[in-house]
Image (spheres, rainbow, N blue to C red):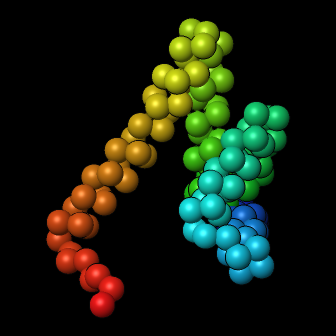
């Protein structure tokens, strides 16, 4: 049981280290880093490499943002097999809709409760 936690921590930490290196070394913006990590997760799933990573690392691979790219691609490919080209679009949103909805809802609640501090 402890080895599962350690493996998850190490793999998740390595994904975060890659993101931090993109910030610090490559001097990329948070938006660029986010897009790169989502695309990497998507490409890894497209080649069938992300599911074995999830099996190996568990939450260490499902919590970072790369998992969002994995979910998008996984849903698109599954629905494309069933419904063809239109399944690509519907599959992405079907699998990720709860996460997107939660982000919008909690973002709205936070914006409603807290007052943003603008630059002076």
- The answer to whether 73 is drawn above or below residue 44 in the figure is above
Q: Is residue 78 left or right of residue 17?
A: left
All told, the count of numbered labels is 0
Location of the N terminus (image quadrant): bottom right
Residue at the extreme top: 83
Q: Is residue 59 visible?
A: no
Closest to the observer, 76 or 35: 35
Residue at the extreme front: 120
- The answer to whether 24 is drawn above or below residue 92 in the figure is below
Q: Residue 45's image quarter?
A: top right
Question: Residue 62, percent across and down?
Answer: 62, 52
- The answer to whether 90 is drawn above or below residue 117 in the figure is above
Residue at 37% over, 53% down: 103
Question: Residue 90, percent across and down?
Answer: 48, 22
Question: Residue 50, percent across and down?
Answer: 75, 43
Location of the C terminus (image quadrant): bottom left
Residue at 73% over, 49% down: 40
Residue at 73% over, 56% down: 57
Residue at 58% over, 36% down: 72
Closest to the observer, 57 or 32: 32
Question: Residue 20, percent across and down?
Answer: 69, 75
């Amino acid at each position: 049981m402890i080895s599962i936690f350690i493996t998850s921590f190490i793999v998740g930490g390595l994904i975060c280290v890659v993101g931090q290196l993109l910030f610090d070394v490559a001097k990329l913006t948070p938006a660029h880093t986010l897009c790169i990590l989502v695309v990497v997760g998507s490409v890894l799933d497209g080649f069938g490499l992300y599911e074995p990573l999830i099996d190996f690392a568990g939450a260490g691979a499902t919590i970072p943002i790369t998992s969002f790219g994995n979910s998008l691609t996984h849903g698109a490919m599954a629905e494309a097999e069933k419904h063809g080209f239109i399944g690509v679009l519907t599959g992405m949103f079907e699998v990720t809709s709860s996460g997107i909805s939660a982000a919008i809802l909690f973002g709205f609640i936070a914006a409603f409760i807290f007052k943003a501090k603008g630059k002076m």
